[in-house]
Amino acid sequence: MTIVAAKRCGDRIVVMSDTMISDSNLTRNNILPGRLKTVVVNKWLTISYAGLSTQAIDAVRTIYTNPGTTTETALKYLLEVSCRHRSKLDFLVCSHEFETRLCKISNGKLFEGAKTYWIGSSEAASELSRIKVSADGFDAPFGHISSEEVEFKNAFHDFMGHNNCEEIGGAIVDCLCSPKGHCYNSHAGVFSWEAIPLGAESPGEQEERKRRNKTGISYYQYHVLSPSVRGQGIVGFYLSQARTGFIYDPLHYDEAMRVYSVGLKEFSDLIDYAGKALARKHG
């Protein structure tokens, strides 16, 4: 199970998801690297899934490789896939092909019109909906991020730090879908027993909290990295202590690729190079 939540804020859509893959038939869950649940297909189309991961990725690849893909053809095909795997595979579709659209496909039915949709664990969605995080005092770095967008992101980060859902976890993937192009947002932070909401503390206070939490297994630093070009379904996850990175490229590979003994700058350059290479390949 998983949790993917999307919120429309004007003509921007924010999609937040985890990476954990769980299987009731297995004794262990794939928490990290897990799999990317939100896949940027191109500059105007992003598809998220919850449920049967392999079948979902195959469906997204079919859409990606179809040169005649439109929002309508993508929705029609995903509805067919959802009907085929009823109650076991749901989708969220974000599109800026002609206008801003946020759609949910569940049990072979299409839903559209709400500002917020979720797919995955109903328990996680219920817990997430009860979290209220204020954006008071947050200074948007570029002046175009609304307070509701900040609150939505902060609530998801808080949920991931404190939730009681056994099948939710791993990395936090933050995807932005806007008329300027769809992309993943690079961010860095700390996983510990204490969550650090975005913009809620001064840099000095955050450093002090980090210092207190450097106590072994309860703490690790992470970086989520995206290429500088938009419209590419590639994202990197870097663990500072282990000097290990994971490259998610679900449009071409089922599993994340692991890169050992690499520095942050080198890994970041690798992600950017991969994104630019794909952009050149597909024009």
Image (cartoon, grey):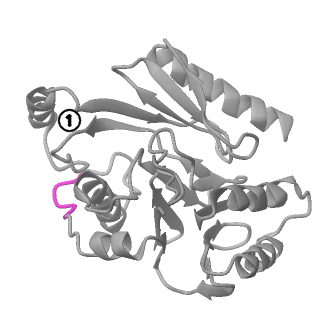
Between 121 and 223, the one lying in front of the other is 121
In the picture provided, is 157 more to the left or to the right than 206?
Answer: right
Could you say which quadrant of the image residue 73 lies in? bottom right
Looking at the picture, does residue 254 appear above or below residue 154?
A: above
Give the residue at x 76% y 74%: 81
Q: Position of residue 126 (x, y in %)?
A: 32, 77
Q: Vertically, is 117 above or below 241?
A: below
Q: Horizontally, is 12 left or right of 197 in the view?
A: right
Where does the C terminus fall, quadrant-wise?
top right
Q: Which residue is mark 1?
A: 218
**Which residue is nearer to you in this view: 151 or 77?**
77
Q: Is residue 236 left or right of residue 146?
A: right
**Residue 181 visible in the shown view:** no
Q: Disc 1 on helix, strand or loop?
A: loop
The answer, for residue 191, to whether it is visible in the render is: yes
Residue stretch in magenta: 134-138
- Which amino acid does the dot numbered 1 rest on? Ser
Where is 105 relative to 169, above or below? below
Give 230 or 173, whichever is nearer the viewer: 173
How far across and down, in percent of the image, does residue 224 sit? Answer: 45, 37
Q: Please name the residue shown 28% across and 60% down the image.
A: 159
- Image x and y of residue 9, in percent: 44, 70
Circle 1 crowding by C-alpha within 10 Å: few under 14, some 14–19, many from 20: few
User: In percent of the image, x 17 and y 61: which residue is there?
Assistant: 136
Most common SS among magenta residues: loop
How far across and how far down the image is residue 91, in percent?
62, 71
Q: Is residue 72 magenta?
A: no
